[in-house]
Amino acid sequence: MFDLDKWAEIYATVRKHKLRTGLTAFGVFWGIFMLIVLLGAGKGLENGVIKDFNIAKNTVFVWTQRTAVPYKGLKAGRFIKLTNDDMRAIAAEIPEVAVLAPSNQLDGTFTVNRLTKSSSFEVRGDHPDFRQVKPMHILKGRFLNNLDMQEKRKIAVVGERIIEVLFQKGENPIGQFIRIKGIYFQIVGIFRGVGKGEALTEDAQTIFLPLTTLQQTYNKVNEVGYFAMLPKSGVPAALVEEKVKQLLMKRHLVAPDDLKAFGSANIEKEFQDIQGLFTGISTFSWLVSIGTIIAGIIGVGNIMLIVVKERTKEIGVRKSLGATPWSIISLIIQESIVITGVAGWLGLIAGTGIIALIDYLMTRLNVDAGYFSNPEVNVPIALTAVLLLVFSGALAGLIPATKAARVNPVEALRDE
């Protein structure tokens, strides 16, 4: 039930001791403000790092290396070559694999030509499903498709840098031909990679051909450089990584204890490690902020003890006139909640405002801050923090309130 007299008393007390109340409330304000700013900055750092991920977060890569252990009459140091048959075996025997994208690339020194212009670029042969492993923006035309693979079409999907170097400004490259090691390929698409920095630069200088076309055209028949795979939903990437390596060991007569014959990369594990890092940053932010908030709440509790001491005679008069212990307790706790609640909400608003301003300026001015992007505040977490703060404020006022409720009216009236 709303009691106007209590609110009037609280207002009068705060107004009478503005500096004392303000300094006490500032500790609580600063704790919430720090919490919001640190969590928002941590989220901005997380967004920046994750944004730089230019491949699917549960990708598994497997490639070959040299054997280190002799096995079944075969010497150590043998280099294994992956094949299309390995691809078919993985698809048939490992149902946990949802996406299987074999890949290869042209090695050695060569140039890519168009009319009188030429330059060196990375040329890869890939499967249409590779786009699920490595997201990209198709700016014009299309990506590789299954018909390109089946018919071994001489077509190419190129990065933006290829267009800048080999074509005139404003010229439409779609349908035009480029020459790679003396063989002509028709451009059917232009793409831009996802991410930033060095990875984005490499993508801009990459040419994708159908894997089957690259194998046939450049004397790499049946050869695969590596496999990129995505597990089915709910399947750990580590399971796919292990099962694929075991299958390939069996197919290529590699000793079961030879850990060097096949290399692999588990992006899911790397991503989880990064997530663990940001969980640690978030935990540190909470610890620092909670320490400050606790200090502020202790300050509130101390102030309420002073308030009780100053108002001992008043409390004695109230009790002698019939005031119940609960009415005394509720008055003190309510004042404590008001101080912590108002300070907490102001800290929340100020912290959220700072984070929103930083995000606005970065977006408006198109600022590239490296591994920092789109700082944001998790609203449910922020509101939960303030609610916990209000609850803590009630606890901070509970001891002074209990002390006030135990005041003996006779002794209180004698108090000077």
Image (cartoon, grey):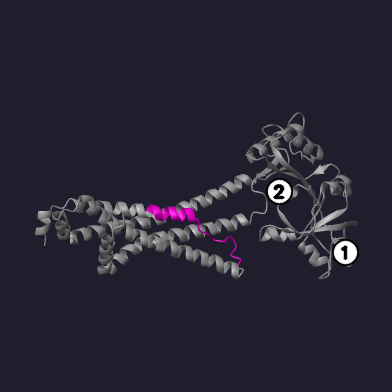
Q: Is residue 154 left or right of residue 334?
A: right
Which part of the image, by quadrant, shows the C terminus? bottom left
Q: Which amino acid does the dot numbered 2 rest on?
A: Val
Residue 355 coordinates in the image, percent (x, y) = 50, 64
Neighbours of disc 1 within 10 Å: few (<14), some (14-19), many (20+):
some
Q: Is 288 or 245 nearer to us in this picture?
A: 288
The foreground one among 361 and 52 is: 361
Question: Which residue is at 61% across, 66% downward?
Answer: 368
Q: Quadrant for the N terminus, please.
A: bottom left
Q: Amino acid at mark 1?
A: Arg
Q: Secondary structure at mark 1?
A: strand
Q: Residue at x 84, y 57 (%)?
A: 188
Query: Does residue 184 appear to the left or right of 277 in the view shown?
Result: right
Where is residue 282 shown, x and y percent of the image?
A: 48, 53
**In the orientation shown, which residue stands out farthest toward the top?**
72
Note whether residue 38 is visible. Answer: yes
Q: Disc 2 designates what residue?
A: 133
Residue position marked by numbered label 1 in the rendering: 114
Q: Secondary structure at mark 2?
A: helix
Q: Which x, y percent locates residue 73?
A: 77, 29
The image quarter in which residue 16 lies? bottom left
CB of mark 2 within 8 Å of CB of mark 1? no
Residue range (magenta): 367-388
Q: Is residue 259 magenta?
A: no
Q: Earlier in the sequence, mark 2 or mark 1?
A: 1
* In the displayed structure image, the side of residue 396 where residue 164 appears, left or right: right
x 71%, y 48%: residue:
133
User: Residue 64: in sight, yes or no?
Assistant: no
Where residue 304 sits, quadrant-wise, is bottom left
State left or right for residue 167 relative to residue 98: right
Residue 286 percent location from the top left of the image: 43, 53
